[in-house]
Amino acid sequence: MFRRALTTAATLIASATLITGCASSDANPSGEGGPAEPPSVRDQLVSFVVGAYATEEDIAEGQCFADKVLAQVSEEELVEADVLSPEKADGFVPRVPKRMATLWADSQFACTSYIKLASRAQAFATNNQLDILTYSTCFGRRIGEARAKQATRAALIRNFKSPAWRELRAAEAYCLAQSQVLG
């Protein structure tokens, strides 16, 4: 039961890393008094990928994702669909309208590797108690990027009965068991 909860957490963390970062919106970058300007739609999209401890690579991936999404859908459409609202997120994964799920997932996968992010998420979820190289190799062999993209689309529209989603979850569980480091 605990292992299943752990892999669920890692899946959501990986999706969160791909989809919803932990950027702070209450900081005032100008350093002046008063409330900060609310982040732009583009900045919110960037923060979906960046996360709390952003590297230069994370920021570049976030900007790539934001640019690709905004090339296909307007800021107004995103605001209207309410996909940027934290209240619409479930386990850090926003609910995206079905008509936007494919372009959202395509934009994500064009800018970053799900295998890499899922591996990083598992390391985080297990408090680095796994061999990340073994996990990443196993996961990459068991679930390729194309199938991971299908699973991501399913998660975005909350289709957790999708065969791709189930395959991704099974691959996570198997690879986690194969890569655990006993302390």
Image (tube, rainbow, N blue to C red):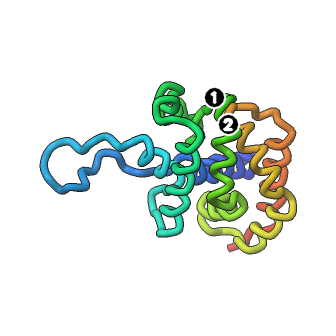
In the rendered image, residue 68, in percent from the top left (x then y), is placed at: 58, 49
Residue situated furthest front in the rendering: 71
User: Badge 1 local density, few (<14 within 10 Å), some, or many (20+)?
Assistant: some
The residue carrying mark 1 is: 97
At 53% from the left and 43% from the top, the residue drawn is 70
Inspect the image, locate mark 2, and give the three-letter code of the amino acid beneath it.
Answer: Ala
Q: Badge 2, how many Cα within 10 Å: few under 14, some, many 20+?
A: some
Query: Which quadrant of the view contains residue 119?
Result: bottom right
Residue 103 on image: x %, y %: 66, 41
Does 25 sit left or right of 144 as displayed? left
| Residue ID at (63%, 49%) | 107
Looking at the picture, tell me which residue is in the foreground, 111 or 161. 111
Q: Tell me the quarter of the image containing the N terminus.
A: top right
As drawn, is 174 to the left or to the right of 149?
Answer: right
Q: Are marks 1 and 2 in contact (CB under 8 Å)?
A: yes
Q: Quadrant of the C terminus?
A: bottom right
Q: Residue at x 76, y 67 (%)?
A: 135
Q: Please state which of residues 64 and 131 is positioned toward the viewer in this rendering.
A: 64
Q: Residue furthest top?
A: 80
Question: Disc 1 versus disc 2: distance between alpha carbons?
Answer: 6 Å
- The kind of residue tagged 1 is Pro
SS for dot 1: loop
Q: Secondary structure at mark 2?
A: helix
Number of marks in the rendered image: 2
From the viewer's perspective, tell me whether residue 144 is left or right of residue 74.
Answer: right
Please name whichever residue, 176 or 163, is drawn nearer the observer in this view of the structure.
163
Kindly identify which numbered label has been placed on residue 175: none
Q: Residue 27's spot in the image, x, y percent?
A: 28, 50
Query: Which residue occupies 18% across, 56% down?
Result: 31
Residue wearing tag 2: 101
Give residue 20's position: percent from left, percent from top: 53, 46
